[in-house]
Amino acid sequence: MIPVVTPAQMAAIDAAAPEPVETLIERAGAAVARAGLDLLGGAYGRRAVVLAGPGHNGDDGRAAAARLRRRGVRVRVVDAVASARTGATLPPADLYIDAAFGTGLSRPYSPPPRSTPAAPVLAVDIPSGLDGLTGAQLGRSARSEVWAAADAVAVAPRAGPECSAPSVWAAARTVTFAALKPGLLFGAGPALCGEVEVADIGLDPAVEPACHLMTDADAAPLPAGTNATHKWRSAVLVAAGSPGMAGAAALTCAAALRSGARMVHLCAPEPVAARAPAEVVASAPPLNVAVERFHAAAVGPGLGAGEEAAARLAEVLDLPIPAVVDADGLRLLARPELAARLRRRAAPTVLTPHDGELAALTGAGPGPDRIAAVRAAAAETGAVVLLKGGPTAVADPGGRVLIAAAGDARLATAGAGDVLTGMIAARLAAFAPVAAADVARRTAEAAHLHGRAGAASGPRPVAGDLVAALAGLAGM
């Protein structure tokens, strides 16, 4: 896993460094120079312009410039503060290195125009003017993914002092140090940072509560079968669907079957059960099963909002097994009696809200700092909370956070959340018994694989395509 630290935490890590700052700057400069040479495709006859600020970010850029010169690159270093005053266009170059300001910047900043706007940009630590905590461009309000996508298009340098809002250079690559910063992952960060490289310069990024980004290597493969294994080894109980919403239950069940569940039992009205995959056992409410045979439950997709739906949710919350609550189940938790049942649960619970559902659940939307928001929600509910979005963040009640960034806008399609619900429940069942400390990890693994399934499903997948893609994923 790759550590993720806030700008404030990074400042503390820098301050606690066991080596002189000059040593760290030289290491950072070396990492930037290596990336620069790669983007230039060599040194002979190449030109680079380094936009260097007054702080250590600028020092890193100047150290990189010295190394590039020694390799034969023609380098010009431009003072970022002076260029901001004059607005003069930067000279032509084959590469621009943005070392103006790092994650400590708190005021809006607009870089000067470039003579060669088609030349790639290499950002040092983070594109200057991007908020290291939220991924918003400083001077603009926090934005939805729609804003972020618009920013990715409208990143041309400002035309002059009449520009009404700051702009940020879109980098082809960003070299950051020791750990990722949230601004590289959230908001407009992914669109503006390009390929992100984390360079080790000898700092210890360990902080508490910890936050990490999931990678492919972090998704543990499902446990292998043995001669003693049978279908009840990882059984999932699903309470989902209602008249007119049979598809949600079917998708949850299908995803569970593809994600490690060897037995899926659907509790739903008969018309809903008729739409379930052939491998699913079904029964009508109320719940009447041998609970001790199940290892996890999923409740909420297509459940409805009436009294029958509330009764079905109450039955699941009373079970002594891990439970995943999504969709209508989350909205029903606004009822005091169901919220009380949630608080009384001894078994782990996973809540999977999007922004609107989080607002209904806690009384407030996530705001620009999504890591802080998911931590607060987990602490308030006592559950593991998965906050959907780009990217998805998972927090446990102790404040530890895992980020799944494998998905993209292709997952914003009807039924994709139902697929994720089934995946989480199946993964909890497959690894049963799951220690409370591992529930968030299994949940984040499912979110990561959900994103991978979206990426493997073509440019415009529907939810059923995600289920089909699961069979071919490593880790499944």
Image: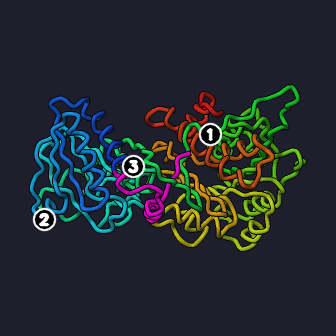
Horizontal and vertical percent position of residue 143: 38, 61
Q: Is residue 346 left or right of residue 206?
A: right
Give 267 or 34, whichever is nearer the viewer. 34
> Residue lying furthest top in this view?
227
Is 8 placed above or below 36 here? below
Distance between the alpha carbons at the discs numbered 2 and 3: 27 Å
Looking at the rendered structure, the secondary structure element under dot 1 is loop
Quadrant where the C terminus is found in the figure: top right
Of tags 3 and 1, which is closer to the observer? 3
Q: Which mark is residue 219?
A: 1
- The picture quadrant where one finds residue 15 is bottom left
Give me the residue at 31% from left, 56% from top. Answer: 57
Give the mark nearest the N terminus, 2 or 3.
Answer: 2
Quadrant where the N terminus is found in the figure: top right
Is 387 placed above or below 249 here? below
Distance between the alpha carbons at the discs numbered 2 and 1: 49 Å
Circle 1 packing at 10 Å, graded few (<14), some (14-19), many (20+), is: many
Horizontal and vertical percent position of residue 44: 18, 29
Which residue is under mark 3?
Answer: 176
Of tags 2 and 1, which is closer to the observer? 2
Horizontal and vertical percent position of residue 461: 49, 36
Give me the residue at 9% from left, 62% from top. Answer: 86
Regarding residue 269, the answer to whether it shows in the image is no
Looking at the rendered structure, the secondary structure element under dot 3 is strand
Q: Amino acid at mark 2?
A: Arg
Q: Amino acid at mark 3?
A: Thr
CB contact under 8 Å: marks 2 and 1: no
CB contact under 8 Å: marks 3 and 1: no
Is 105 placed above or below 273 here? below
Which residue is under mark 2?
Answer: 85
